[in-house]
Amino acid sequence: MNSFTQTPEETEEILKFLEDDTKNVRRAIKEVKDLDAKFEVHAKAETVDESVQHSPVEKNQIIKTLVFKASDEFIAVMCPGDKRVDEDKLEEIVGEVRMANPSEVEEETGYIVGGVSPFDLDIAVYASDEIPEGEVRPAGGSRVIGVKINREELFGVVRPEVVGVT
């Protein structure tokens, strides 16, 4: 295991996140335990820009999982970090949409904004067709833990409908 150093305040912050997120990280672990996936602990990152500061990856490898309210149901959309979901394109697929607010995200997924993982969701999951081949990094159920996983394995576990929405 590689080590890193932190100030006492930074360590307290990570401990707080881990206490709050343990259940959600375990959800992700359960989904990928038989795959060639690794978990990466990093400094708190709530945005793609923060994530690439803490990990040796390109923006397009960071996979955002965004939650939308679509007509009468909630859906999740996996999207590369360097792209935005085009709501007009998404509406052509699922009907009228709006971004879910943070309390709706937590209620519908159990995850908090900034740590929404595509694993173990009870809502429909869509994936942008622009998610790159090879290693990608979705959230691992926390803003301080990500998952290194191959795109094909990610899609094999999550089973999203792949669509053009960026």
Image (cartoon, rainbow, N blue to C red):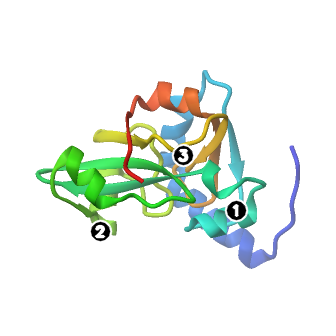
- Residue at numbered disc 3: 25
Q: Amino acid at mark 3?
A: Val
Place of residue 138 in the rendered image (x, y in percent of width and height, measured from the top left): 56, 47
Q: Is residue 119 above or below residue 50?
A: above
Q: Is residue 23 left or right of residue 68?
A: right
Q: Amino acid at mark 1?
A: Val
Residue at point 64%, 35% (across, down): 149
Q: Secondary structure at mark 3?
A: helix
Q: Residue farthest to the top?
A: 34
Marked residue nearer the N-terminal end (2 or 1):
1
Q: Amino acid at mark 2?
A: Asn
Spatial CA span between label 3 and label 1: 20 Å
Place of residue 166 in the rendered image (x, y in percent of width and height, measured from the top left): 42, 54
Question: In the rendered structure, are the residues bearing label 3 and label 2 in contact, judged by CB atoms less than 8 Å apart?
Answer: no
Q: Quadrant of the N terminus?
A: top right
Q: Decide which of 166, 10 is in the foreground and name it.
A: 166
**Is residue 107 visible in this depiction of the protein?**
no
Residue at point 43%, 63% (across, down): 113
Residue at point 52%, 31% (across, down): 30
Marked residue nearer the N-terminal end (3 or 1):
3
Q: Is residue 108 left or right of residue 49?
A: left
Residue at point 49%, 30% (across, down): 155
Q: Is residue 120 left or right of residue 29?
A: left
Q: Is residue 113 above or below residue 73?
A: below
Task: Categorize mark 2 by other alpha carbons within 10 Å: few (<14), some (14-19), many (20+).
Answer: few
Task: Categorize mark 3 by other alpha carbons within 10 Å: few (<14), some (14-19), many (20+).
Answer: many
Q: Which mark is residue 101?
A: 2
- Residue at numbered disc 1: 52
